Amino acid sequence: MRLELSPHFRSGGPRLTGRCLILFLCFLALPARANLGETIAQCVARYGTPIHFTEANDKFPFGTITFTAGGYGLTVFISHDKEVGARVSKTDKSAFTDAELQSIMGADAGDSKWSSTASDDPTCLAWTRGDQAKVLYDKEKHMVIFTSLEMAQALQAAPAKPPTGN
C-alpha cells in the first residue's frame, strides 16, 4: 500500500537525498520527541514520511500526522500549520522508564524547564512549564501526551458533543 499525501504535504516534504537519509538514520537512534510549535514541514523533515494523517473537522479541531521511528510512535496534532500537541508511545506498548520520560521532555523543554505538578488522574504523572504547556504520562496506556496552551484553548472552544440518547 502506498501512502499518498495531499499537495500541501508533498510540497513541504523533504526530498530523499543522501543528506536527508543520513539525518533520518540519525533520528532512528534518538528517542521520539515532541517539538511544540514546529511546522508540518519541520516535522516531516525531522521524522520522515508520515504513516498516516488526518485533517481537522467539525468533530476534532486538529489535523494529525503519525510517524514511527526508532521503536516509537508519534502522533503530532496540527493547528494552522504548526504542532500544538503530540502523543508519544513505544511501538511495543511497553512502559517508559524515568530516563526515557526525562529525555523526551528534555528534547522539548526549549528555554523552559518542566516542573512536576499534581494530576487529577491517579494513573497519570503530570508536568507543566512556563509557557503553560503540559505533559501527561498515562501509566496504564504507556503514552506521553504533550499539550500547548493553544491546543488547550482550542479544545475548550470546540463545540460540545451532543449527548447520545438511548
Image (tube, rainbow, N blue to C red):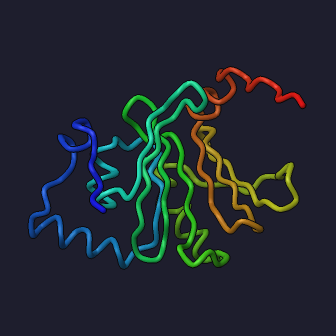
Image: 83 above or below 16: above
Observer-nearest residue: 71 or 105? 71
Q: Position of residue 24 (x, y in %)?
A: 26, 69
Which residue is at 65% across, 23% downward?
A: 158
Q: Position of residue 69 (x, y in %)?
A: 39, 70
Q: Which quadrant: the C terminus?
A: top right
Image quadrant assignment for residue 97: bottom right
Tell whether 33 sits left or right of 102: left
Q: Residue furthest front?
A: 166
Image: 35 above or below 20: above
Q: Position of residue 66 (x, y in %)?
A: 44, 55
Q: Residue furthest left?
A: 17
Tell whether 159 sits left or right of 80: right
Q: Total of numbered circles in the picture?
A: 0
Image quadrant assignment for residue 153: top right
Which residue is at 27% across, 49% downward?
A: 4
Q: Which quadrant: the N terminus?
A: bottom left
Which residue is at 74% across, 57% downward?
A: 116
Observer-nearest residue: 137 or 66? 66
Observer-nearest residue: 69 or 84? 69
Which residue is at 73% across, 23% downward?
A: 160
